[in-house]
Image (cartoon, rainbow, N blue to C red):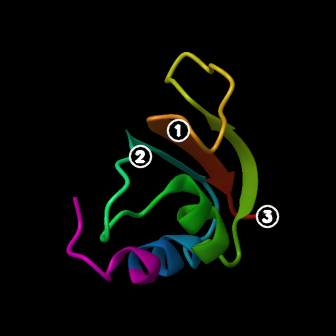
């Protein structure tokens, strides 16, 4: 968990690292401080979005799902 308002800066820092994968999974709670999968993908400047799943087993994802696993990498 991160402090509200800090997630974009964390994603930017991770995106500036050379090589490797960013794999994150978290509950998609919807409230005033939510940071959803679509927010992560939008904030991930410098990272290529590979896939988003609804489970760690690779279940198909929709924006209405309660959980998201996002996989990105630096090109």
**Magenta segment range?**
1-9
Provide the residue designation for mark 3: 75
Q: Which image quadrant: the C terminus? A: bottom right
For marks 2 and 3, give the one nearer the viewer: 2
Q: Is residue 38 left or right of residue 14?
A: right
Earlier-in-chain disc, 1 versus 2? 2
Report how far apart the C-alphas of labels 1 and 2 lie in the structure: 10 Å
x%, y% of residue 35?
A: 41, 64
Location of residue 18 with respect to 23 vertically, above or below: below
In the image, what residue occupies the spot 61% across and 60% down?
38
x%, y% of residue 12?
A: 52, 80
Report how far apart the C-alphas of labels 1 and 3 lie in the structure: 19 Å
x%, y% of residue 13?
A: 46, 79
Location of residue 63 with respect to 20 vertically, above or below: above
For marks 1 and 3, give the one nearer the viewer: 1
Provide the residue designation for mark 1: 69
Earlier-in-chain disc, 2 versus 3? 2
The secondary structure that most of the magenta stretch takes on is: loop
Provide the residue designation for mark 2: 28
Magenta stretch: residue 6 in it? yes
x%, y% of residue 37?
A: 55, 54
Instruction: Looking at the picture, tell me which residue is in the foreground, 39 or 64.
Output: 64
């Amino acid at each position: 968990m991160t402090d509200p308002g800090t997630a974009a800066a964390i994603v930017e820092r991770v995106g500036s690292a050379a090589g490797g994968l960013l794999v994150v999974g978290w509950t998609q709670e919807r409230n005033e401080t939510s940071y959803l999968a679509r927010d992560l993908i939008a904030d991930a400047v410098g990272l290529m979005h590979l896939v988003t799943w609804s489970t760690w087993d690779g279940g198909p994802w929709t924006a209405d799902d309660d959980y998201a696993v996002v996989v990105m990498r630096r090109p």
